[in-house]
Amino acid sequence: MNSSTPRHTACYTLLLTITGLLAASAVESTFDPDLICTLVVNGTKINDPRACNSWIQCIDEMPVNGTCAEGLFYDRNSEDCVASKDVVCISSDACAEMANGFTADPYTCNGYYYCKNGTGTRGECNAGLNFNPGTEACIRDYPCNFKMSPDNYCNILPDGVFIKDPWNCNGWQMCWQGEIVNGTCPDSFLFSGSLGKCDYPQNVECTFTEPPPQTAEPDYCPKVGSFVSDDRTCNGYYYCRKNTEGQMVLEHGVCPDGRFFSGDNDGACVPRTDVRCEYNRCVNMGNSTIQLANLSDDGCTGFAICQNGTTIAMADCPNGEYFNELTQLCTTQVISFKACSLSTESTTETMIDEEITTTTAT
């Protein structure tokens, strides 16, 4: 178990009593201003994730670009250009904020870029290490539980702005305090992106928009027809296929609730307790009430406290007990889910620590 991670066993009883929380889920999107501007009210301003100092305003469903003056970054909530020191820039361009030097990969925990004159060369830490931008080094157990995607609606839109759900004619989404809230219109009403509210079906034009498939990087797919992890979530995966040009492309999918993606045997969705995953294990948990999830590589003795699909705290079971995600309870029965079992590396480190302690005591 990572001893540097604060956990509070006292939270366990208290948080189990909390109910009635707002249902929401973290949803990622691929940035397409032409599409987004058809889903929001006329005049909405959007942070451009491709640059720290740029913004886009949707005028008559068309994106109009704008750029801040030198030394200023665009702030999505104030909808204004402010001093760069006052804004945390989350950009899809890793070198947008740093023209020269090392910087973290905006999409992964273990990736980094070396930027030279604004152009980046990507590198990746060895397995089990994450990139620490403060020390510019790969560090074991460096915390990276969740990274907001630069393309996430809650990075590019102000809080409180309604956006039409492109997959659901009566659905809408809204960012609130960094989380995406999902909702649907009542009865037979459909959601109007141009009005930002529910309206009668005869007044709303609705067509589903299928996202274009992504082109796979070389060697990302072992073969045509295989399934691979999306390398961002525990339950997300890509299906590998070839398009008419012979290129390997990726079609994204998500495992159903209660299952995580496993890359074994060309990929499959299996019970979440059967998968070791270093990404956010609270995904799809805690949407209507607080839920608890086993933690990776801790011997099944601790748990994450989940709210709206994210980890809000972590705690240990009392008196050396084990946590069972299926029953949501601590127990004296030994729990050995693959999801939280100690890795060989962690077991070796524990044995070395015990040996050192015994030697010192002797």
Image (cartoon, rainbow, N blue to C red):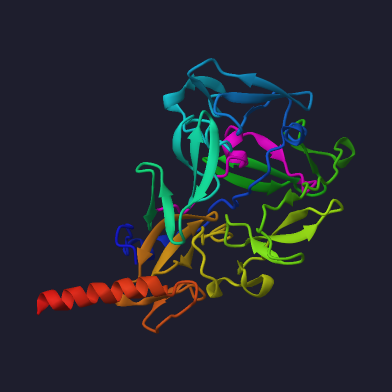
| Principal secondary structure, stretch drawn in magenta | loop
* Residue closest to the eye, 41 or 232: 232
Q: Residue at x 42, y 69 (%)?
A: 297
Residue at coordinates 55% horizontally, 47% vertically from top-left?
A: 107
Q: Is residue 12 above or below residue 172?
A: below
Q: Residue furthest left?
A: 362
71 to 226, vertically: above or below: above
Residue 290 or residue 321, whichever sits in front: 321
**How far across and down, in percent of the image, does residue 191 sit?**
77, 40
The residue at 78%/27% (across/down) is 61
Image location of residue 71, percent across then percent down: 48, 18
Compared to 288, does 104 lie above or below?
A: above
Give, as a single range, the part of the protein colored magenta: 143-170
Q: Residue furthest bottom?
A: 333
Relative to 234, 15 lies left or right: left
Q: Picture coordinates of residue 180 (x, y %)?
A: 60, 45
When asked about the image quadrant of residue 40, the answer is top right
Identify which residue is drawn at 80% across, 43% down.
190
- For this orientation, the residue located farthest to the right is 202
* Residue 10 picture location, percent across and down: 31, 63
